[in-house]
Image (spheres, rainbow, N blue to C red):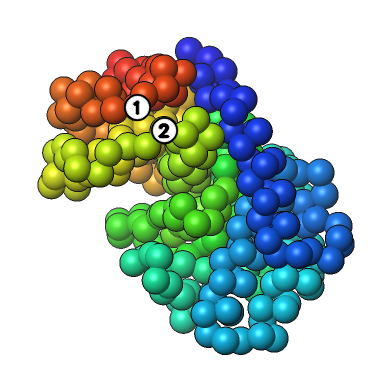
Amino acid sequence: MNIAAVLDLEPIATYRRERTAAVLEILCPDHAPAPGGESLPLNYAVAHHRLEGAENAARRGDTTMLDWYRNTSGAALTTLVRPSRLGPRIVIAPNEDEMIRGPHSDTPYYVLGPDTTRGPESLAVQTDEAFDFIGAASLGKLVAAHATVICLTGRRRPDQTLRSFAITRLPATVFTDHTGHASVLGRDLVHEAAHNWLNDALAALQVTIPDDETYFSPWRGTERPAYGFLHACFAFPLTVIYAAQILPGTSGTGHAILADHIRQQRTHLAAAQDDFTRALKLVTDQRLRERIDTVFQHARVL
């Protein structure tokens, strides 16, 4: 299967261009060069960090910070950008106490600001190595477009539970722990990039998932709203596709983690199949419905 072709959905790029322009119009930018140059994915991500930061500052009544996000941040954040195999990225590693909890998210998250610094070079190298694995799995375009701000939230041992998440208010941004194994980091970048892709696809195609439908999630062991259930049925299969593709080229701890991941996901995907078939009918756009189904069914046979 040509996974890159399956994930090529032109309305997403159109939506992102229009959304970025709209956000910058709200912020009244100072016409400084965009942090990502010609990179729409990075500029799209940074524009939303600026908007979130400005909204938080306005809510606190902090006019100095509001002015920074509106007029100074575009140029200032350029210093955070690194070249990478997948294009310009921002890779950061904030401390736990720098994470914030906003009214729109129960999960602590991070917003780029005047005190943000680049992550350590070692983490940038690990991220680039993860990109190599991602490219080998033919998922480079997915991560290039939907994981442009990478927030590494903490080092964990391989036997510990890893946290990773994305939030709708910060598209093209991913938050994830890391283990020091680039192949495992690649898996988690694919997972969160998949969530961002689906969020953008739903918005671009103006598809609304009803919030009164629930389905049993084998990943959570509980009933979940259709929106979250369908997200899991898209993101986890993509991690299976990733892991299956790169597994022969891995060894040691990374190999063991990915092999175990595939085994676990086979069980979960089988358990989710019937509910997935029913939930997929809620996706009213045929192009999107077919893509989600193709990803799910391909992962089922790996």
Viewer-closest of 124 and 66: 66
Q: Position of residue 3 (x, y in %)?
A: 51, 20
Hey, what amino acid is under mark 2?
Val
How many residues crowd around disc 1 within 10 Å: few (fewer than 14), some, or many (20 or more)? some
**Residue shown at 66%/85% (left/top)?**
63
Q: Position of residue 163 (x, y in %)?
A: 37, 58
Quarter of the image with the C terminus is top left
For residue 141, what is the image quadrant?
top right
How many residues crowd around disc 2 within 10 Å: few (fewer than 14), some, or many (20 or more)? some
Is 80 situated above or below 117? above
- Disc 2 marks which residue? 207
Tag 1–tag 2 contact (CB < 8 Å): yes
For residue 39, what is the image quadrant?
top right
- Disc 1 marks which residue? 283
Viewer-closest of 137 and 101: 101
Q: Is residue 260 visible?
A: no
- For label 1, the SS is loop
Is 83 situated above or below 120? above
Which comes sooner in the sequence, label 1 or label 2? 2
Q: Is residue 3 left or right of residue 67?
A: left
Hey, what amino acid is under mark 1?
Val
Q: Is residue 271 left or right of residue 261?
A: left
Query: Cα distance, mark 1 to mark 2?
Result: 7 Å
Q: Position of residue 119 (x, y in %)?
A: 64, 66
- For label 2, the SS is loop
